[in-house]
Image (cartoon, coloured by chain):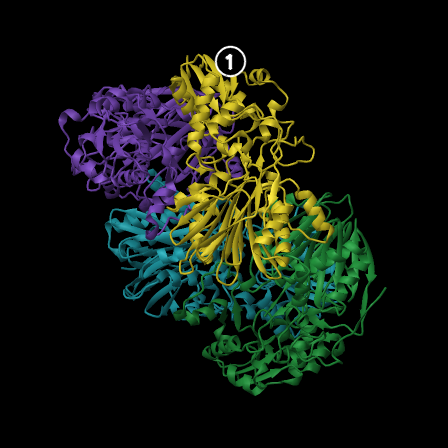
Chain colours: A cyan, B green, C purple, D yellow
Amino acid sequence: MHDACGVVGISLNETANGAAKSIYYSLYALQHRGQEAAGISVHDGKSIRTHRAMGLVSEVFDDAQIALLRGHVGIGHVRYATSGRSCIENSQPLLVKYKDGAIATAHNGNLVNSTQLREQLEEAGDIFYSTSDTEVIAHLFVKELLHYDLPEAARALMRKIVGSYSLVFLWGDTVLALRDPLGIKPLCIGEIDSGFMVASESVAIDTLNGKLVRDVKPGELIVIRNGEMKSYQLARSTRPAHCIFEYIYFARPDSIMDGRLIYDVRVNIGSNLAREHPACADTVTPIPDSGITLAVGYHQHSGISYRECLMKNRYIGRTFIMPDQNMRETAVRLKMNTIRPNIEGHKLILVDDSIVRGTTSRRIVNMVRKAGAQEVHVRIGSPPILAPCYLGIDMASRDELIAAHKTVAGVEAVIEADSLGYVSHEGLVDAVGIPKENLCMGCLTGLYPVPIPGEKCLAEQTRLSEYLD
Amino acid sequence: MHDACGVVGISLNETANGAAKSIYYSLYALQHRGQEAAGISVHDGKSIRTHRAMGLVSEVFDDAQIALLRGHVGIGHVRYATSGRSCIENSQPLLVKYKDGAIATAHNGNLVNSTQLREQLEEAGDIFYSTSDTEVIAHLFVKELLHYDLPEAARALMRKIVGSYSLVFLWGDTVLALRDPLGIKPLCIGEIDSGFMVASESVAIDTLNGKLVRDVKPGELIVIRNGEMKSYQLARSTRPAHCIFEYIYFARPDSIMDGRLIYDVRVNIGSNLAREHPACADTVTPIPDSGITLAVGYHQHSGISYRECLMKNRYIGRTFIMPDQNMRETAVRLKMNTIRPNIEGHKLILVDDSIVRGTTSRRIVNMVRKAGAQEVHVRIGSPPILAPCYLGIDMASRDELIAAHKTVAGVEAVIEADSLGYVSHEGLVDAVGIPKENLCMGCLTGLYPVPIPGEKCLAEQTRLSEYLD
Amino acid sequence: MHDACGVVGISLNETANGAAKSIYYSLYALQHRGQEAAGISVHDGKSIRTHRAMGLVSEVFDDAQIALLRGHVGIGHVRYATSGRSCIENSQPLLVKYKDGAIATAHNGNLVNSTQLREQLEEAGDIFYSTSDTEVIAHLFVKELLHYDLPEAARALMRKIVGSYSLVFLWGDTVLALRDPLGIKPLCIGEIDSGFMVASESVAIDTLNGKLVRDVKPGELIVIRNGEMKSYQLARSTRPAHCIFEYIYFARPDSIMDGRLIYDVRVNIGSNLAREHPACADTVTPIPDSGITLAVGYHQHSGISYRECLMKNRYIGRTFIMPDQNMRETAVRLKMNTIRPNIEGHKLILVDDSIVRGTTSRRIVNMVRKAGAQEVHVRIGSPPILAPCYLGIDMASRDELIAAHKTVAGVEAVIEADSLGYVSHEGLVDAVGIPKENLCMGCLTGLYPVPIPGEKCLAEQTRLSEYLD
Amino acid sequence: MHDACGVVGISLNETANGAAKSIYYSLYALQHRGQEAAGISVHDGKSIRTHRAMGLVSEVFDDAQIALLRGHVGIGHVRYATSGRSCIENSQPLLVKYKDGAIATAHNGNLVNSTQLREQLEEAGDIFYSTSDTEVIAHLFVKELLHYDLPEAARALMRKIVGSYSLVFLWGDTVLALRDPLGIKPLCIGEIDSGFMVASESVAIDTLNGKLVRDVKPGELIVIRNGEMKSYQLARSTRPAHCIFEYIYFARPDSIMDGRLIYDVRVNIGSNLAREHPACADTVTPIPDSGITLAVGYHQHSGISYRECLMKNRYIGRTFIMPDQNMRETAVRLKMNTIRPNIEGHKLILVDDSIVRGTTSRRIVNMVRKAGAQEVHVRIGSPPILAPCYLGIDMASRDELIAAHKTVAGVEAVIEADSLGYVSHEGLVDAVGIPKENLCMGCLTGLYPVPIPGEKCLAEQTRLSEYLD
């Protein structure tokens, strides 16, 4: 399961310099949101310069590259993509030129009406270079900018695109930030030395020693020029739909998102999980890294000892040679090793954030059994994933989702656990501390906050967005 | 503080193949012992082939390279080195050719009489290509092999070299493993599918799904040919001198070393630290990653809540651009970010493995104070480091070691902690579970197990080694 | 002085395979037309795959890349560009997606109304990703393809674009080749094993052991699908305007272009130069490599001995470190060394293809004088370059062209030659063997075959093109 | 057929700087002598620093590398090697450290008693890291330097090593140059701005705008320190034995070697070839590049027209993908293309420097026949190669040499020429202008200037060297 992207935009006052280096460090802080490609666009006073390539931030940029990216304003992007679409053409920021200038786009999220919009544009003769919905957004926005001034154009864009989007644009020397009316994906504002920034997560602001001002509001447009910031509330929804999985899994624990510290949310989830699914065991242990904070919460509530039983190896690089078929066992052990004495003869509570296909869970359960675990009780920090995500997370198709086809007892049998417990919807929502109505829980319920072709969409689940003048 | 190296040797029976791939995975499991260079030598039935280069295991080798390294027997090495000596000439295995054949050498440890030995060899006309003591070892061993058969030659070598050494040789198609008479650096034996292996740590054996047989004994020579193993006890000491810092810091927590699980040792240290240096605080938190297990132990004994307050960023690559002077704050935050709500208003117990110069500790104390910590009590899982290590760890010179010049109160003042507590010698030894007399604690006492020029060496501290026939 | 590009298109019958490899070898044969970037697009039965990157053909592609480019049909491109525009975005083939499919474009030439066309398209809302006129062509062609069937669409495209263009398209699984109505840049057709190909020069056909069928006619569209070829004469001009500099300098001597072997043309030029500008000297010597065949011609007509006096070093790679200011002399000598005894005391006739700025000529004249030349008579295989090229050659601006501002006597003085002779317009045209009216000699006359903004354009010089149904 | 290596040494006076950059440009001028690996060693005032790697000079070094190689004195090497021995360990300069310091060695040539010397050294316990005879030389030289002062040590070295050697050493901050007593491989001295240099060929001196002083004499030791040069004549032979193939093929035409301009020698050879082997033909044409100057000479003497019929493609890089078996014809055409109209219906004299196996000659003869040649007369600028070279040229084994097993008529039949003529021994020697007795013509006669195990060695052919005090 993977998140799509991280975005950042920085505008310093005119006398400052070196936006590129600050963007570089911000992207580094957002690297967990995408390790496939990275890119930076800056405006150097005359035009926009972009450098983007496949790889980690530290691989894509070196001193010389950063030095070439002169200017006091710019945006950046880190990207994840499945292998099929993995190519330089799909990396971002996407720079386009049009009648009145140039605009670079960085996007986190996913449109659900991208295909229709693209067909309409193609019908009208538009030409595309990639398969990304970011290119669709760039086309639509440019068309509006040709007819309207800035807030109007952005509003017109919002009326057309449906889905999740936290967008950062570099429009000439101006940074724009636009968050969808439901606020599905995160986006926040920071104040830094001699300017402002926007970023997917507050950790990017921390890295630059800045101050988190607030989240960009759902439906809000932020305009930053020469280190000054303006806000336009372009749309308002009956209620927001913040992505629940940012809290469970994606965001860094040290980020603050829509007012909640991710770390606290995860401890709470673990705690509620312990309350709802106790187990007679002597050891609480996480599947690293994503299960760690959940396991701490489980331990705190249950009083059962917290012990590390699995060690993760951190050195698998992009060119790592994976084992052949006849070295299957090795494949698992390369990523994770057991600390046998903490396992042998123990009754374990194994805490993880989610179960997607069930194969990894089964392998790990088997590995700890081989290491001598007496009992293995699996506890999961999310309810069963019943449906695909259409709004920015590359989970899996419905066919592949084990919980879409099996009961909890069925999953328990497949992963060969002694017991299996998922946190309840209520327990999860309580832990997050945001009313259920204000969250997107599509993957857990099959009910999405926007109409999705081929999916049920109860009227009461769908948010209505009103566009404001 | 850095360890020197990791070594591995694998000998499969003649019909098996692909030693190189198994060595590759073993080195990957030992990557934490050295990230600067990696190398593999194999015997392909006729001669020894070596590939070694600067970089991580995953960067140095690709499928094509591994395919070229045919054979059922070989050795490998990962290396750390300070920048001054960082070059391909110093990487290993070191392959030399002589009258009767060829021998490749991989070494973990440090000789204390390397300079004298080298001068003697140079005096006799020997020529060297690098500045490493590994080359000195290779020269001496070859000279003995010209005159004696195998066990005698190895014994003669041991008589000459003084210091720490866990050596793995590829001698024609035979793997040799030799551990110094005091057993200073670790080395263990594993049984794997169709053969045997030796490695610095047992995690390498786990990765290949093998079984830890036992440690190589101090003063023992292990000979593996065609998947069969023989042992020769060449020397015996009054008592061993296992490196204490392998337990405190270097080894992976999931390794078993001289009969102790590293994880358990570290929990025990944390527990003893809590007993010896309690603090009136509400939060126990580690400096990641090395403080984590120690903090778990402190928490278990004290009952004070365990919370993560510092997040480590894992994506700094080799080509990462470090910030300029005017971005000092950023430099700290790039590696570590605070989880402010877990800190603000809290009284923290900050647990780390050691204090070398004190500068990093001070920066972190300041960072958590800025994040709102009410009190900061620093607890260290080792006694003060008073003296340099001459036996394989690149710590710092005596001038740089803060505890060589200041009392605990002085260090406390420098790092600006509210209180500072080091685990006692007794607490540490108790946690390791090995008698004090059988450990090397030179860096903590200034008393070394072998005579070191310019250092005090109390007779009762120095071990006498008897060479056996 | 540099040419812009080389293009190739290959369509094998459906049962054949490996178009990519044949394109690879063709591009290699065309490498002299552009060393900055290379790319290949193939249709794999379903969609178009492209790989393009900066570098030589042998650097851009390896076995793995070629293996990924499956299919029996494809196109390729090699590119030169001045440093300012040197980036991956401007490399080709350029792949675009539109309503009815995808089309990849490879272009050799230059449009003179690109800016206006682009402005019109931008006015209508079109968006661009690069600054190349190739993107303008792709946009226009797609728009026509949405409304017309193939020959009509191509004809409509031709009506709009003005300038030089030898275009190769991959349109689904069909290769299209289109040459401008004046036939400015070369393009020829070859028959190869199991298919047809088009290429900038016939040497590409030779490399694949194919047979040169004929040139693509000015105004002709060639359509190749499944190894079958069709022709559509879309436009006819009063007379063609073949680029004179292809004959003088750009094309490989072993190419046959519009019926003339380049080698013969150059020998003829040299011969006419000898007739027009004899000199009392004992040695004819070329400035390698472009002066070689011209010098052979001069020698044959004059009977004066041919001797090599200058040796060219062939190993300057892309990363070659150029000398500092204080090593000026070295800079010249790195590329060219004198064979002193062939020079010392001799009266030389130094033959080169053209003089652009005059700086290189002066340096070489000085170098041979320093080597002891008694007299240096410079003979040039083109008339003076008086005006810039707008049709595909990156020469220099009018300000930089020495002959735009100086008489022949003036140039002679600047380059410090004992005498200077340019071949006459008549001598050149006679050597080429194509009537003056059928050549583009814009850079030699300032009169261009198409109207160019800011340049004089005598009616009688401009060709009228009639578009045929 | 390939030459082994190129060497260079440069010593500037102490106040000068940047020896590395001058060595870089010198190596570039010598690149034709070896394209496999390159290296530079400099002395930075304290110690010797080396950088060497596989690849062309322009690939091995960049600005940063050169900047790290500080100092006013250093040596360099370019290397060719057959694939078997192609590895970084065998590249040069070879740096060794010993009792009194360090010495870097760069070697062009080949010892014939390397195996015996190595066995003797190994017998005495010496250890080797590579299979090169350069390492043997370094060992021997160091051993002598331990006992004798400089000239004595060099003389003692010369007494031991037998074969061809042009050696350049960096011994501390001193450059040494040593040429074998027979002067088999070339080595010359140049005076440059603020210092002296030695190099394999004079073109390296030209590149630095220096002045060729003279050749290093056979048996001479040159010592350069702080820009001052001393000479020691250590050995004197009855007569020298300059390698004949340097004149025929290896050296650059613009080099002056032992007083002869290579270009002149080759014109003379061509001229003598025309005299000895006239042919009734209308066209003289070279096989590029090595046949060019020979063909010019043939043309001048015969009066038959010189025309280029074959074009060489210059862009095959190290990673070029060679064609599969089913593209055989393409393989030839990738390197060489025919200029058909210069061939069709013509009677050709095809001039090349030598025939080794005969396969390439046959392919080219066939190619020009296919292009319509009426007759093909092959003329070769060397006598038949009857025997292998043991003194520095990697030709082929005796089994592979076609002329070792066939008469001229037999070779003519194999290569399918209408006639075949080799220059005679007398014609060749006359062209070189050096008495036959002073040349090494081992490959043409089977009689070598030094005793070679397994080869006949007539007493009168072997030179006696007297070592002088």
Q: Quadrant of the C terminus of chain B?
A: bottom right
Q: Is residue A166 visible?
A: no
Given the image, on which type of amino acid does mark 1 rest?
A: Asp
In front: B41, or A22?
A: B41
- Which element is circle 1 on? loop
Q: Position of residue D72 (x, y in %)?
A: 44, 57
Residue drawn at point x = 46 percent, y = 37 percent:
D257
Image height of C191 relative to B89, above or below: above
Say which quarter of the image contains residue C120.
top left
Q: Which residue is mark 1?
A: D418
Left or right of C370? Residue D191 is right
Q: Position of residue B288 (x, y in %)?
A: 57, 70
Q: Position of residue B372 (x, y in %)?
A: 47, 80
Image height of A128 relative to D294, above or below: below
Q: Is residue A134 visible?
A: yes
Q: Position of residue A205 (x, y in %)?
A: 41, 67
Left or right of A163? Residue B269 is right
Residue drawn at point x = 46 percent, y = 50 percent:
D61
Residue drawn at point x = 40 percent, y = 20 percent:
D301
Count every numbered label the image shows and give the total: 1
